[in-house]
Image: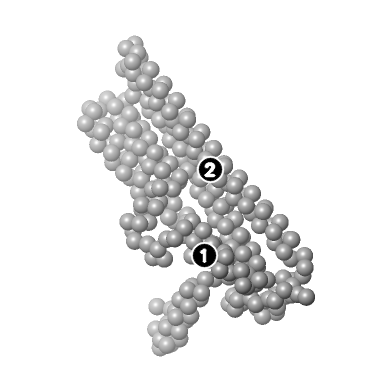
Amino acid sequence: MKNPVQPDPRPPSMPRAASDAVTAALADPRAVTILSTEHWSLLTSRSLSYNEAFSRAQMFLTFLSASLVALGFVATNAAVRPELPVVGASLLALDLFIGLATLGRLQRAASEEFLALQGMARIRHAYLELVPTLEPYFSTSRYDDLMGVMAAYGATPSRPTAAQSVGHGLTTMPGMVSVIDSAIAGALAAAIVLAIGMDPGGAFIAGVLTGLASVVALTVWQQRSFHAANRRLEVRFPSPTALHGAHEVRQATADQPPGRRNT
């Protein structure tokens, strides 16, 4: 006896013939085994991304700590103390390069994790098409759009405020590394100003302005990267709220006079 298949309304982008083919494929007795294998593969991929992200961040922080210890030894040596700004600028420049490279890899690892979560959401959708009565026992989303995938990270507001978004961003690993990179950039700017012979007050101002500018620049870059990835996202099983919102937009557009559409 075949399992009853009660799929959700097919996605708008999926033709009816393709939807019927997917329904027939899920009725195959081998489907559960294949889906389970893919699920474990995605779990492994996500675990590898996590481990690499932590390893890269640990390597960066270890190198930064070693650099600061080296600068401390230089500062205590009276013979080379006059050269401290030059030595500090050299080490901080290397620290900043490693920090930016680490941030770029963390951003990429986050994208890889997001794709793995999206794949697992699609597999959960298939599980629930096979056995719809299991839905009350699933704690994560069955939808593969942005709202559905982000639900895997816990309950978050559907429309977070700017303060909530900034606060959440600072608690993530890329956000923390961004702040550290900005502090290094500010210290590097101050060291360069001191090395060229300017007074400490000017170095302090240059360091603060550079640090703040770096925070803003890195935040904007991460937001743009996130929105670009969201635009490239292929959604096959959108959330009901997303479908409802899209229907309202289409209805509002249809009600406009022809000359006012797409404005």
Amino acid type at image mark 1: Gly
Image height check: is 158 above or below 42?
Answer: below
Question: In the picture provided, is 188 more to the left or to the right than 174?
Answer: left
Question: In the picture provided, is 244 more to the left or to the right than 202?
Answer: right
The residue that appears at 46% across and 37% down in the rendered structure is 99
Image coordinates of residue 113 in percent, x first then y, are 56, 52
Image coordinates of residue 77 in percent, x first then y, are 35, 13
The residue that appears at 36% across and 21% down in the rendered structure is 72
Is residue 94 visible in this depiction of the protein? no
> Toward which corner of the image does residue 224 lie, by quadrant?
bottom left
The residue that appears at 43% across and 26% down in the rendered structure is 67
Is residue 19 visible in this depiction of the protein? yes
Question: In the picture provided, is 217 more to the left or to the right than 205?
Answer: right
The residue that appears at 57% across and 52% down in the rendered structure is 112
Image coordinates of residue 218 in percent, x first then y, are 40, 47
Q: Secondary structure at mark 1?
A: helix
Question: In the picture provided, is 54 more to the left or to the right than 259?
Answer: right
Residue matched to label 2: 53
Give me the C-alpha separation between circle 1 and circle 2: 23 Å
Residue matched to label 1: 148
Residue at the extreme top of the image, as rendered: 79
**For the residues bearing labels 1 and 2, Cβ distance under 8 angstroms:** no
Image coordinates of residue 145 in percent, x first then y, are 53, 66
